[in-house]
Image: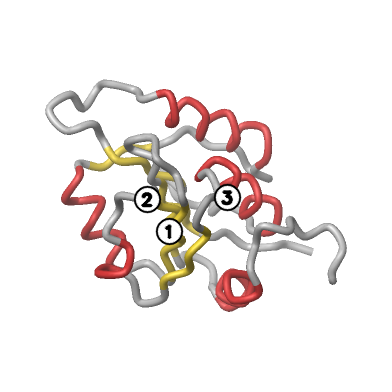
């Protein structure tokens, strides 16, 4: 057991988060996302909401403050200006939890998949709300 580490972060996921370097990306994905097909490393957190995973990850991992879009969500197909409720929740979590809060950027669906292919890891959650996918770029921990 460890202190101050959210219990929903599995040992394997903690290992990946620790092994990531500055600029590496991690994807938190919903239950519909093709995580296993796209991932170099796929961590499953079935039954856990993507927003809860986002909060837990941001408690231990900084966002990159050197890029304009350290957090990206998937645009709604055929309505790129739509903002699904889960995206509003993602923004609230980032605003409340991230060490350097940022505004969410957006990627078209297939561009999101392409970016996800280069992720250090993908976390497949049990999230059933559509568009419950977010890409995070890891920052640095300064002394």
Q: At 63% from the left edge and 68% from the top edge, which residue is drawn?
A: 10
Q: Earlier in the sequence, mark 3 or mark 1?
A: 3
Q: Write down the residue under mark 2.
A: 31
User: Which mark, by number, is residue 124?
Assistant: 1
Q: At 30% from the left edge and 49% from the top edge, which residue is drawn?
A: 32
Q: Earlier in the sequence, mark 2 or mark 1?
A: 2
* Mark nearer the viewer, 3 or 2: 2
Q: Are marks 3 and 1 in contact (CB under 8 Å)?
A: no
Q: Residue 11: horizontal and vertical position, in percent? A: 65, 74
For label 1, the SS is strand
Q: Write down the residue under mark 3.
A: 53
Task: Give how far apart the Cα atoms at labels 2 and 1 are.
Answer: 6 Å
For label 2, the SS is loop
- Residue 68 visible here: no
Q: Nearer the viewer, residue 59 or 129?
A: 129
Q: Crowding at label 2, few (<14), some or many (≥20) Cα neighbours within 10 Å?
A: many
């Amino acid at each position: 057991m460890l202190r101050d580490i959210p219990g929903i972060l599995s040992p394997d996921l903690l290992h990946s988060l620790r092994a990531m370097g500055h600029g590496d990306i991690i994807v938190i994905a919903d239950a519909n996302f093709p995580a296993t097909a796209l991932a170099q490393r796929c961590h499953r957190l079935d039954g856990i909401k993507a927003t809860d995973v986002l909060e837990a990850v941001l408690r231990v991992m900084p966002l990159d403050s050197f890029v304009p879009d350290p957090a990206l969500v998937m645009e709604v197909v055929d309505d790129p200006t739509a903002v699904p409720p889960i995206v509003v929740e993602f923004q609230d979590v980032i605003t409340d939890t991230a060490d350097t809060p940022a505004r969410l950027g957006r990627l078209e669906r297939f561009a999101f998949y392409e970016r996800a292919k280069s992720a250090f890891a993908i976390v497949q959650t049990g999230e059933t709300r559509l568009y419950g996918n977010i890409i995070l770029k890891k920052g640095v921990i300064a002394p």
